[in-house]
Image: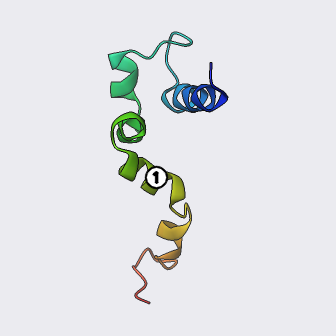
Amino acid sequence: MNTKIMDCLCQMLDMVKPKIAGKISLSDLKRCKLTPIFFDTFFNLEKYLDHEQRDPFASQRDHDIDGQEVIS
């Protein structure tokens, strides 16, 4: 199997953390908080790329210590 496909599969399994190793069930997806990313990976390339290319610290940087939004 293609290495890129295997990498994607491993990422999805790590993200969903299915109860039965190697098999993702509907209950696994309902339990996972990252289900939208799971579906975007396979069905919406544009949204998937947005997830992959976003800055993980951007939402933290946009708020000051008190939790107030900082306007730049």
Q: Nearer the viewer, residue 65 or 21?
A: 21
Give the residue at x 66% y 28%: 3
Give the residue at x 62% y 18%: 1
The spot of residue 38 in percent (x, y) is 41, 35
The spot of residue 56 in percent (x, y) is 55, 60
Give the residue at x 40% y 87%: 71
Q: Residue furthest bottom?
A: 72
Q: Is residue 44 above or below residue 54?
A: above
Q: Is residue 14 above or below residue 25?
A: below
Colouring convention used in this rendered image of the protein: rainbow
Residue 35, quarter of the rendered image: top left
Q: Residue furthest front?
A: 2
The spot of residue 12 in percent (x, y) is 52, 30
Q: Nearer the viewer, residue 58 or 60?
A: 58
What is the secondary structure assignment of the residue under circle 1? Answer: helix
Q: Amino acid at mark 1?
A: Leu
Which residue carries the number 1 mark?
49
Give the residue at x 52% y 24%: 17
Q: Residues within 10 Å of mark 1 (few under 14, many from 20)?
A: few
Q: Is residue 27 above or below residue 12?
A: above
